[in-house]
Image (spheres, grey):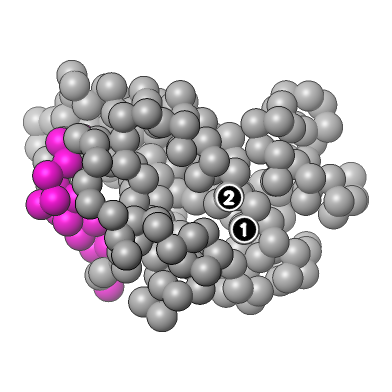
Amino acid sequence: MTRARGHDDAVIVFLKAPVAGEVKTRLSPGIAPAAAALLYRAMVEDLLARLERLASADVLLHHAPESSRGAIARWLGPDRRLARQRGADLGARMSHAFRSAFHDGYGRVVIVGSDVPELTGRIVRAGLAALRRHDVALAPAHDGGYYLIGLREPRPGLFHEMRWSTRGVHAETVRRLTRLGLTHAELPPLEDIDTYASLRRLRDRLDKGAIRPASMPRVAAIVRAMRLPR
């Protein structure tokens, strides 16, 4: 059963069940679908381990498709706060997730992706803290999108008719913020692991010591076991 609200702030994680051939499909043919699913599972588990250390925010898991609820509950445990994603595209799903969280009484809410291994609890806390002074918190991804967005009230205009999964998403979001007269805080840019090239860059950063393996133990172990060509 989903637990009731425990804090004033919420972190919403968008995720899927780690099914081979259904998650991280753009990593193939560089790695097999089964390996991509294992990597995705590791990214989610490492992220949730970091978020569970947040002392003042509830972690809400929004899953897709609807039929994956049972699989995710078996995977991550039955006591998680689970809700299904609702909407025709990513923007509609995020807008609904924010609206639902504010309806439930949360005062500051951030949505994060589940495929950014370098996303830390510190960055999430910074996003929530920024919402004390700004209307929006935004964290750009290297591919031109963003991996975190935070609001303190619903802002459907930021999500409607956006060209998702293109390099212009972050820039267009900033333009909309300006048109709406909203202030925003920018958080550090990070890379989501969507392509084989981004996976190899992650491996290189781990090998060079630019990332501490202890900060993403499951991901680091799997990436190193893959023995990706240089």
Secondary element type, mark 2: helix
Q: Which residues are magenta?
A: 88-110
Q: Residue at x 17, y 56 (%)?
A: 100
Location of residue 39 in the rendering, given as x and y in whole percent from the top left corner: 68, 56
* Callout 2 crowding tier (Cα within 10 Å): few <14, some 14–19, many ≥20: some
- Look at label 2 and name its amino acid: Glu
- Picture quarter containing residue 84? bottom left
Which residue is more in the foreground, 43 or 9? 9
Position above or below: 224 against 126: below
Q: CA distance from mark 2 to mark 1?
A: 6 Å
Which quarter of the image is occupied by the N terminus?
bottom left
In the image, residue 62 above or below residue 8 = below
Horizontal and vertical percent position of residue 130 = 27, 22
**x, y percentage for residue 226?**
85, 54
SS at mark 1?
helix
Q: Is residue 96 magenta?
A: yes
Q: Residue at x 47, y 32 (%)?
A: 53
**Front in this rendered view, residue 230 or 128:** 128
View extreme (bottom): residue = 67
Q: Residues within 10 Å of mark 1 (few under 14, many from 20)?
A: many
Relative to 130, 214 lies left or right: right
- Dominant SS of magenta comes to helix
Instruction: Tell me the residue at 62%/58% (across/down).
Output: 41
Q: Mark 1 = which residue? A: 41
Label at residue 45: 2
Q: Where residue 23 appears, x then y in whole percent? A: 58, 67
